Image (cartoon, coloured by chain):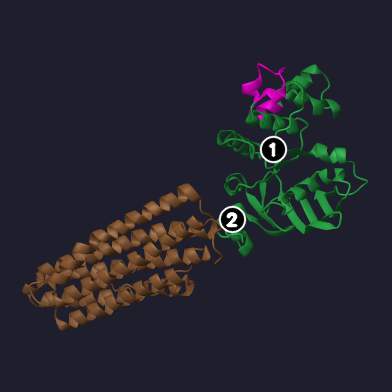
Amino acid sequence: MTEHIVKSYEGQLQELTNTIIKMGALAESQFSNSMIALLKRDQDLADKVSGKDFLMNEFDIKIENLVINLIALRQPMGIDLRETVSSMRISSELERIGDLSKNIAKRVRHLTFDVPGEIADSFKRASNVVQKNLKDVLDSYSKRTKDTAFRVWNSDLQVDELVNLVMAELLDFMKKNEKNLEISTHLLFAAKHIERIGDHVTNISENVYFLVTGDQIKGTRSKKVDKSVET
Amino acid sequence: MVNEKIKISTRNLNVYYGIKQALFDINLDLFEKKVTALIGPSGCGKSTFIRCLNRMNDVIDICKVEGSIKVDGEEINGKEIDVNVVRERIGMVFQKPNPFPKSIYDNIAYGPRIHGLANNQDDLDRIVENSLKKAALWEEVKDRLNQPGTGLSGGQQQRLCIARAISINPEVILMDEPCSALDPIATAKIEELIDELKKSYTIVIVTHSMSQAARVSQNTGFFHLGKLLEFNLTEKIFKNPDNKMTQDYITGRFG
């Protein structure tokens, strides 16, 4: 892309992009660390995740200020306008991902024993897909590629199915022994949070698609829901 | 832009100043009772283009205008066509307010008098009042109609010129950077006026202010080096233009 005639304008837009990329990287590590902490019952790592959440909020505030300044002082148009608007939205989505990761980390304290292997594996399968989607969508943001954004958007169904599987396993686990109830309750929330993070990732993909093309993603994703574990 | 009535259409419009070609094959449709903004860097031909629409280029000896310009399907480009009739239908407002060195009243009454639009003094008074009201100037000047028009503020002078343009009841109003000499409040008043006027008139505005084009127009044309590179809905132009050059221009990336 040709550079702006006014270099300081170019600099401000670049700073906005860079801040989103940094914030996205932090969101990725917050989420993946929260999952490691949960599945390994690693309290230190969980505390680290909780302790870093304020950084996500600071990024969000910084981006909001950058965006408001751009709108007030530069009146961005065309691609710059889309960049500005979508950055603000992406920042909010990342901030929510940060909150949910922190919430997953906070549940580690309440795990009275290790997550059973089979359930842990299902958790990993679900969270791996979401982590990959998050990484890909942030990639598509920095490279401005609509195809990856579209793929991520279209893979939400897979996330939902994997999360439903975790929940079904947790229900079985609860039925086995009432001692399992407490830990399972926390794990049910964690599973639901993974699904919510997945939703935020698809929201980001919609914004990246809009940023690149100027259009909204069209079409409907089929959502197959297993009624037995619908929450 | 579908199902809109075309007020003016140009086809293969080429303009030359001597040997220098200023416009290249302009095919542009202007829709009735809409505001069309023309944007582009200095010297891109947008002023030359609107000056063709009321034959203002006729007064420049070396200027040659070729091609078709139709108003309501009727050709207006041609030596045999009476420019006075054309200019009666297509009024113009310029960058710098240029009231006649006459009273406010006479500035407005001049056109209707020479075109014989008023049968008597009452008629003329009514035309003056209505024109000033339409230009949102009446309340500010009704008690001093006999004072010189040049004594008004810049913004008022520009509205006086708009009132003068509409006094002969044109169908189209051409505006060549009408706000570039005005402060933001006077500019806002003109923009509000443009919104109001588009209910009755087809308006074409040349502007260097992107945000003004975005605010006042429904369609926007982007000119560059004498060519019309993009013509689209204004929203489309400023959110997601089709042409890369348009994108570069509106975002300030023009190299």
- Which callout, 1 or 2, points to the residue nearer the camera? 2
Q: Who's the residue at 82% across and 39% down the image?
A: B87
Q: How many labels does the image show?
A: 2
Q: Which amino acid type corresponds to the residue marked 1 in the rendered image?
A: Ser
Viewer-side residue, A214 vs A158:
A214
Magenta stretch containing residue B136, yes or no? Answer: yes
**Could you tell me residue B168's position as x and y percent?**
78, 31
Instruction: Confirm whether the magenta stretch covers residue A114.
Output: no
The quadrant in which residue A135 appears is bottom left
Tags 1 and 2 both on a single chain: yes
Q: What element carries label 2?
A: helix
Chain assigned green:
B
Label 1: which residue?
A: B200
Circle 2 chain: B
User: Is residue A222 visible in this depiction of the protein?
Assistant: no
Q: Distance between the residues labelled 1 and 2?
A: 30 Å
- Answer left or right for A49 relative to B95: left
Q: Badge 2 is on which residue?
A: B250
Q: Quadrant of residue B104?
A: top right
Q: Quadrant of the N terminus of chain B?
A: bottom right
Which hue belongs to chain A?
brown
At a point 39% along the width and 58% down the height, the residue shown is A89
Coordinates of residue A155 in the picture (x, y in percent): 38, 75
Task: Specify the segment rendered in magenta.
Answer: B131-152
The quarter of the image holding the C terminus of chain B is bottom right
